[in-house]
Image: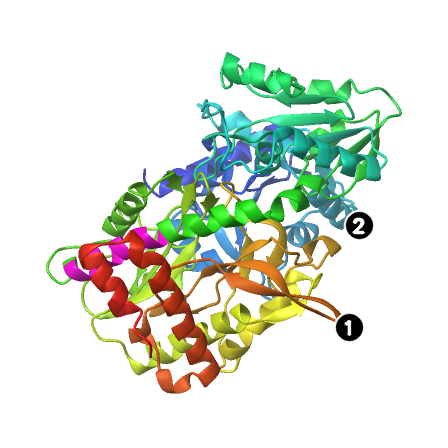
Amino acid sequence: MTESVFAQRIQALRAAMQARQVHACIIPSSDPHLSEYLPERWQGRQWLSGFDGSAGTLVVSDSFAGLWTDSRYWEQAVNDLQGSGIVLMRAGQADVPGPAQWLAGHLARGQRVSVDGQVLALQVHRQWQTALAEYGIVLACDLDVLGDIWTPRPALPQGTVFEHLPPFACRSRTENLAALRAALAEHKADWHWLSSLDDIAWLFNLRGNDVPYNPVFLAYALIGADSARLFVAPGKINEALRDTLLDDGVTIEPYDGALGALACLPEGQTLLLDPARSTMGTFGAAAFVELVEALNPSQLLKSRKNAVEADHVRQTMAHDGAALCEFFDWFERTQPHERITEITIDEQITAARSRQPHFVSPSFGTIAAFKANGAMPHYHATPESHAVIEGDGLLLIDSGGQYLGGTTDITRVVPVGQVSDAQKRDYTAVLKGMIALSQAQFPQGTAAPLLDTIARMPIWQTGADYGHGTGHGVGYFMNVHEGPQSIAYRAVVTPHMAMEPGMITSNEPGLYRPGQWGIRIENLVLAVPAQETEFGTFLKFETLTLCPIDTRCIATTLLTESERGWLNGYHEQVRARLLPLVQGSAKEWLIERTRPI
């Protein structure tokens, strides 16, 4: 595909807009379930622009096309958008207006902006409508202008649904439904609507493969006090599983009948709905019921892993760590003598994980980024564009796995050849930030975004910063990104972001120098009780990830005694936990890389 194809598609969209009497069109990165990773059918922003990052909003008018995306993707977007005529709008910069603000400043009163309401969050719709209405601009949500030109459009995924079973499923389906119904009663609601796929998969102890890397399936759910209706395309659930679900009070209905069922709810009844996780299409279908708007109860329920789930995750981390030992041992033995590329690394690390028990798939696309590629936080190598691992430089590898007993996500940076003093200073600043958050103790209920500055302080002290958050929630054999907690100081703080025992969160500060190198060190941590005093209950983090942190990149004189102690203690734990799981040269590599400093 040539670069000019995307420019041609933008022109085709403008022609369709003119035919529909639309003056601007918004193409968000979303689907009817507001997923982070999208089935091909809803990757319209990528199809139009060529930009394949996971976050971005495309706005097209008769004379302008702009892509808004955050700092994780700026360098990638510059490359992806070449030749398309689309302007990169660097979201988050002080002088860059948001999409709604740009539209308000460039369209005339009475003109129409189109966005497909079936893929637009109700919460976002309200924000955009308020911003545009002030200027007399109409936001039309009943048109799918992209659908006029996207032919042939990819079909819906047809993956099968399977049951997440004991011993790894640690809460029964009936327990999950009972907990949800208790929350429903607290909200004084008759019904609860679910369209977010991870909430549905968790609630019913089901998994699928409709979305890359996330073990979920396309579905809707409508829950009442004595009924549970699961809307799934025919053929995705076999008869045996259908009978099992029916025994637990769950009925299976066609996927395309979900909105119709919602519209048939008795007038005057109340529906619990999450405006951040439900679309305008849902809102339109629920016209005759009274809405109770609140966070999906399942968001909090699944975020707090119970003790048995935490034990399974600890075991999973050990197997994941053993796979990484095998991989890094192979890499260090092989790289000086054979041609290894960023693509090779992805293949080898996935192969190492696949040899571990209960492995299902990667939890996201592996980021193997050498030298300047590491400065793009969400870089991904392709067969057409990737680096060979040779010469001097830093290699950043961010990868993870889906296992029946948990989800992993880890980033390590390793040296290839010589490491400069400047690289060591940056690496050490990032390590100090990661250690600081690892050692944090804080009152239970502290809003997660407030913890972000703990990790940033050592990096800020060098005059540097990073554009992404420090931590995201992680699911249990579920999405690698889950809420409601988020360790990111730029996030809007809500009561639901409080850190609670059982929450698993990433700890991943970074430092990126465009054109030179990128550094990120990431472990997953579990919030656990620390102590109770007259001031209340305090939490701390238990580090779950088990893999050596490369000490060859550290400027050891910059570490405090406390930081040295933490690192040596961590490596002692890694060695003890992983030695029984590795053998041969991988065992020798583990012993060498966990020597105290």
List the residue tagged with mark 2: 134
Name the residue rendered at 75%, 56% in the picture: 495
Q: Secondary structure at mark 2?
A: loop
List the residue tagged with mark 1: 534
Tell me where the magenta segment starts and ends, as one range. 320-333
Asked where in the image residue 530 lies, by quadrant, the reply is bottom right
Q: Is residue 379 above or below residue 142?
A: below
The kind of residue on which mark 2 rests is Glu
Name the residue rendered at 37%, 87% in the picture: 557
Mark 2 Cα-neighbour bin, 10 Å: few <14, some 14–19, many ≥20: few
Res. 62 visible in picture: yes
The kind of residue on which mark 1 rests is Glu
| Quarter the C terminus occupies | bottom left
| Alpha carbon distance from label 1 to label 2 | 51 Å
In reply to whether residue 322 is colored magenta, the answer given is: yes
Circle number at residue 246:
none
